[in-house]
Amino acid sequence: MEQVSARLASLSPSETLAMSQKSQELKAQGFNVINLSVGEPDFFTPDHIKEAAKKAIDDNFSFYSPVPGYMDLRKAVCDKLKRENDLDYTPEQIIVSGGAKQSVCNTLLCVVGPGDEVIIPTPAWVSYMEMVKLAEGTNVLVKAGIDQDFKITPAQLEAAITDKTKAIILCSPSNPTGSVYSKEELKALADVLAKYPNITIIADEIYEHINYIGKHESIAQFENVRDRVVIVNGVSKAYAMTGWRIGYIAAPLWIAKACNKLQGQYTSGPSSIAQKAAVAAYNGPQECVEVMREAFDRRRKLVIEMAKEIPGFKVNVPDGAFYLFPDVSALFGKSFEGKVINDASDLAMYLLEKALVATVGGNAFGAPECLRFSYATSDENLVEAMNRIKEAVALLK
Ligand code: PMP
Ligand code: GLU
């Protein structure tokens, strides 16, 4: 009998990956689909990083690495945290995993158990809620709409905290909104959390380097919460290395030890070759990061201007990441050839079929009124995609 576990049955598949898969299938059938669904840099991994991986193969880094990652990589991460964030960590506090995705999931599995509540400011990345379910915890979603720039206030945070709150996941710059919390905003949230010493703060900083308003701010800089912050980061976005699968946590020692134990039974250390490439990413020249950030910024401006011209799209200005997350609720209730658009998932499906543009409906991010566009693609693709979307939206009556 084919019967998956109750745990698995409760999980939703990843909508970002599903939309991307769908667009690839359509492409394979010969349709000229423009894929703005999945969020990953469209650049190739920089050459000096690729060279380091080739050298690692030739140098026979073909054996299991230590479970938490090679020492040189964990030291390189500590150096990065000092150099870029002025934060002091020891290599024992760094656990390297198969992508930041695994880092978030490891942390939740180590900290959260049945009945524990996890606060997730929404809109939020699709996988957080499902990972909390995997850990048998309870999601407590705190909604921040476009009118508050998709950022929660300290009062909202405090109202959501109960004696069951075990963790909060903060993502800045945010997927899917692109919003970036300022230092003052983060401090105000830290001041609330400082009153509740049992709450672990998971700070997902994977978009750290894709920031258009200046220096990245980490909640780990505030002494009153510092010992409870788990920074999640990795090489996927900053160095265009999504396929290499290297992420890490910088965590209090007890959480690092727990993740090490979990990973030791579950996946072991991540790919040896990819780790050596990541060492080159962190210790090597950093100009490539700025070159890509500038390209994303140019595309951001382009896509904002074009989206603003589409009737029914309410657009804010994202300060980071590579997503635009317009509120499209003004289009709900409209239809094309009898098919009614009731929410953003319906609109995403309509745009895929009619405009051959893949986006992701906000439903899975906890915001069914919004639609996510990844603008990590060429300027030509973006112009063509936005024109097609404008034409398709004009057909809705
Ligand atoms: N956090 C967020 C907010 C993300 O958008 C992503 C990318 N999907 C990840 C974590 C995971 O990144 P990685 O590729 O390193 O697993
Ligand atoms: N960050 C990407 C996204 O949100 C990757 C896909 C995923 O893992 O969700 O589209």
Image (cartoon, rainbow, N blue to C red):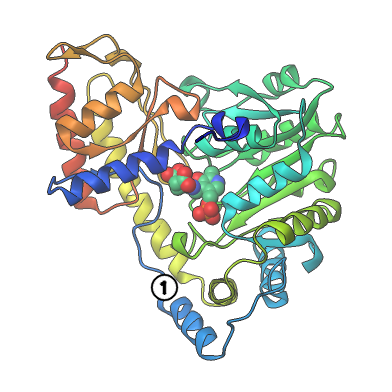
On the question of residue 222 being in view, the answer is no
Report the residue at 50% width, 25% height from top. Answer: 366
| Residue 203, horizontal then vertical, whole percent | 67, 44
Q: Work out whether 90 lies above or below 315.
A: below
**Label 1 crowding class (10 Å Cα cut-off): few <14, some 14-19, many 20+?**
some
Residue 210 in the figure: left or right of residue 43: right
Number of numbered tags placed on the structure image: 1
Q: Work out whether 187 lies above or below 327.
A: below
Closer to the camera, 19 or 122? 19
Q: Specify whether tag 1 is near ligand 1 (CB below 8 Å).
A: no
Q: Work out whether 260 lies above or below 59.
A: above
Closer to the camera, 19 or 50? 19
Report the residue at 41% width, 40% height from top. Answer: 16
| Residue 307, horizontal then vertical, whole percent | 27, 32
For label 1, the residue is: 46
Q: Looking at the rendering, in which quadrant would you find the C terminus?
A: top left
Closer to the camera, 252 or 215? 252
Q: Name the residue at the front extreme.
A: 1
| Residue 168, horizontal then vertical, whole percent | 70, 34
- Ligand 2: image quarter: top left
Report the residue at 14% width, 46% height from top. Answer: 32
Residue 255 in the figure: left or right of residue 175: right
Classify residue 332 by image quadrant.
top left
Q: Name the residue at the bottom extreme.
A: 59
Q: Amino acid at mark 1?
A: Pro
Residue 98 in the figure: left or right of residue 23: right
Residue 180 in the figure: left or right of residue 328: right
Is label 1 in a helix, a strand or a loop? Answer: loop
Classify residue 369 by image quadrant.
top left
On the question of residue 264 being in view, the answer is yes
